[in-house]
């Protein structure tokens, strides 16, 4: 579901429960036509009430570990480095 490069960075910044939540959200986003927290909470497979799932999603999305600077810049940098190495090998 998640590319191995992403998986490596995500495991470094998220604990196991957060990583599972992220995987479930990615799966839901791929399957749902509407991207609303209420809709995601209704279909999130957690054994808690829908309002609790909604709050869980909101708290998860506000995590500092998911910030652009901490998580996504290193992933983008790794992708760029990987692609430039690939291009350099082809020349």
Image (tube, rainbow, N blue to C red):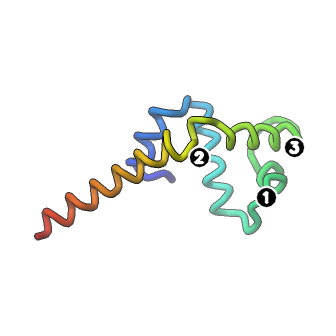
Residue 22 placement, left or right of 13: right
Cα distance between the residues tagged 1 and 2: 17 Å
- Furthest toward the front, the residue is 69
Of callouts 3 and 2, the N-terminal one: 2
Element on which disc 1 rests: loop
Q: Residue at x 80, y 36 (%)?
A: 47
Residue 67 placement, left or right of 62: left
Looking at the rendering, which quadrant does residue 58 occupy? top right
Of callouts 1 and 2, the N-terminal one: 2
Residue 24 percent coordinates (x, y): 64, 47
Residue tagged 2: 23
Residue tagged 3: 50
Q: Which residue is drawn at 63% across and 62% down?
A: 30
Q: Which of marks 1 and 2 is in front?
A: 1
Cα distance between the residues tagged 1 and 3: 13 Å
Query: Are dots 1 and 3 in contact, CB under 8 Å?
Result: no
Numbered badge on residue 36: 1
Q: Which residue is drawn at 83% across and 51% down?
A: 42
Is 49 located above or below residue 90 in the figure?
A: above
């Amino acid at each position: 579901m998640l590319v191995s490069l992403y998986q490596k960075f995500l495991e470094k910044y998220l604990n196991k429960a957060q990583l599972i939540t992220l995987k479930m959200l990615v799966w839901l986003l791929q399957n749902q036509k509407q991207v609303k927290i209420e809709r995601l909470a209704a279909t999130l497979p957690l054994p808690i009430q829908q309002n609790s799932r909604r709050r869980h999603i909101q708290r998860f999305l506000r995590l500092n570990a998911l910030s652009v600077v901490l998580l996504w810049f290193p992933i983008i940098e790794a992708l760029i480095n990987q692609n430039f190495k690939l291009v350099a090998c082809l020349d």
